[in-house]
Image: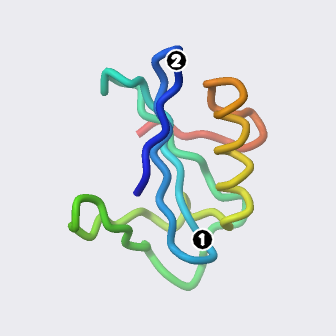
Amino acid sequence: MVELTSENGNCLLIGIGGRVGCVQHSRADAEPPYLMALAAIPNSTEEFVEFLMGDTPSPVAARYILPFEDVKEIAVAFLHTGQCTQAVAWEEI
């Protein structure tokens, strides 16, 4: 997991797992809301995928597992705007 923080007080937490990843958008002060990017086509082979956070495996539900190309696009949009992109659907968790 890697975290990007914008000057406007938003964070993007990105899980990277080879050809897939996940993205969570939140405020830098860790207050709600927490938004997860939804996969356009959920990963049907696994119920969840684990990403390491602080050397601890953290399971992420399949509906939040995105192709790595989508993860990159979300990250680039965040770097330009500091906001979550509307190019993907988001779900509050």
Q: In the displayed structure, would residue 22 be above or below residue 28?
A: below
Decide which of tag 1 and tag 2 comes sooner along the chain.
2
Instruction: Name the residue nearer the viewer: 5 or 35.
Output: 5
**Front tag of 1 and 2:** 2
Q: Which residue is situated farthest in the top direction here?
A: 8
Neighbor class of circle 1 (other Cα within 10 Å; few <14, some 14-19, many 20+) is: some
Quarter of image, res 93: top left
Q: Return the x and y of residue 17 as percentages of the image width and height.
A: 51, 73
Amino acid under label 2? Glu
The quarter of the picture where the N terminus appears is bottom left
Quarter of image, res 21: bottom right
Instruction: Name the residue nearer the viewer: 22 or 33.
Output: 22
Amino acid under label 1? Val
At horizontal 64% and vertical 44% (from top left) the residue drawn is 75
Secondary structure beneath label 1 = strand
Secondary structure beneath label 2 = loop
Distance between mark 1 and mark 2 Cα atoms: 27 Å
Q: Which residue is mark 1?
A: 20
Q: Which residue is mark 2?
A: 7
At horizontal 37% and vertical 72% (from top left) the residue drawn is 50
Q: Return the x and y of residue 76 as percentages of the image width and height.
A: 71, 42
Instruction: Name the residue nearer the viewer: 65 or 27.
Output: 27
Q: Is residue 38 left or right of residue 81?
A: left
At horizontal 43% and vertical 52% (from top left) the residue drawn is 2
Q: Return the x and y of residue 29 as percentages of the image width and height.
A: 31, 21
At horizontal 38% and vertical 24% (from top left) the residue drawn is 28
Whether label 1 touches label 2, CB < 8 Å: no
